[in-house]
Image (cartoon, rainbow, N blue to C red):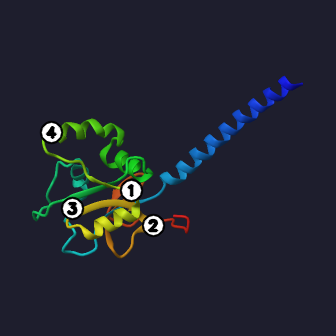
């Protein structure tokens, strides 16, 4: 009788793993629908003048200055943050992990990767207080300290505010 219990226990564990995987995948699918706001400082003096087609160049550090000569300071969330993964895939067409070799190669030419912060609140504070800063956050977290330039939806980058679904959990 004991071998049968072990067999049933194994089946329960396998079923629990499958259910857990579905829960994780469902959560990621919901998260993928979030809109990302590309942000700059709210103060006009600190905010750089940026065009949508320059965004990838700025984060690859191929464009270092805005049109009026202001130094640009892109900032990323940490490499495991879901918004960083989504931003990297949609704007840079890569993943943070695949960018490591690129940045290692540029290091010897004196080019540093974008500054990295650990949270969206840290992103907001850094962008709000730094001349020429540009970053990204969940669009539902935009406040008066920063100004959204663009909105990144699952399908496109736009300057028009898309429909947002913000709830207290965000």
Q: Earlier in the sequence, mark 3 or mark 4?
A: 3
Q: Nearer the viewer, residue 66 or 74?
A: 74
For image coordinates 39% across by 73% down, the residue present is 143
- Marks 4 and 1 in Cβ contact (< 8 Å): no
Q: Nearer the viewer, mark 1 or mark 3?
A: 1
Is the N terminus in the top left, top right, bottom left or bottom right quadrant? top right
Q: Earlier in the sequence, mark 4 or mark 1?
A: 4
Q: Nearer the viewer, residue 157 or 27?
A: 27
Q: Earlier in the sequence, mark 2 or mark 4?
A: 4
How dense is the environment of label 3, judged by Cα within 10 Å: few (below 14), some, or many (20 and up)?
A: some
Residue 30, image x, y percentages: 54, 53
Q: Secondary structure at mark 2?
A: helix
Q: Earlier in the sequence, mark 1 or mark 3?
A: 3
Q: Which label is found at residue 118?
A: 1
- Marks 2 and 4 in Cβ contact (< 8 Å): no
Q: Nearer the viewer, mark 3 or mark 4?
A: 4
* Residue annotated with mark 3: 50
- Marks 2 and 3 in Cβ contact (< 8 Å): no
- Marks 3 and 4 in Cβ contact (< 8 Å): no
How dense is the environment of label 4, judged by Cα within 10 Å: few (below 14), some, or many (20 and up)?
A: few
Q: Secondary structure at mark 4?
A: loop
Q: Earlier in the sequence, mark 1 or mark 2?
A: 1
* Residue annotated with mark 4: 108
């Amino acid at each position: 009788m004991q071998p049968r219990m072990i067999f049933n226990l194994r089946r329960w564990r396998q079923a629990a793993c499958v259910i857990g995987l579905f829960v994780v995948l469902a959560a990621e699918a919901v998260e993928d629908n979030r809109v990302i706001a590309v942000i700059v400082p709210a103060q006009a003096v600190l905010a750089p003048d940026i065009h949508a087609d320059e965004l990838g160049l700025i984060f690859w550090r191929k464009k270092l200055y805005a049109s009026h000569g202001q130094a640009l300071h892109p900032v990323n969330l940490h490499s495991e943050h879901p918004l960083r993964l989504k931003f990297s895939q949609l704007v840079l067409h890569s993943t943070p992990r695949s960018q490591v070799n690129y940045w290692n190669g540029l290091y010897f030419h004196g080019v540093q990767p974008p500054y990295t912060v650990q949270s969206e609140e840290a992103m907001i504070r850094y962008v709000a207080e730094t001349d020429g800063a540009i970053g990204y956050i969940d669009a539902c977290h935009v406040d008066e300290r920063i100004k959204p330039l663009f909105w990144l939806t699952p399908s496109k980058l736009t300057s028009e505010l898309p429909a947002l679904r913000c709830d207290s959990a965000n």
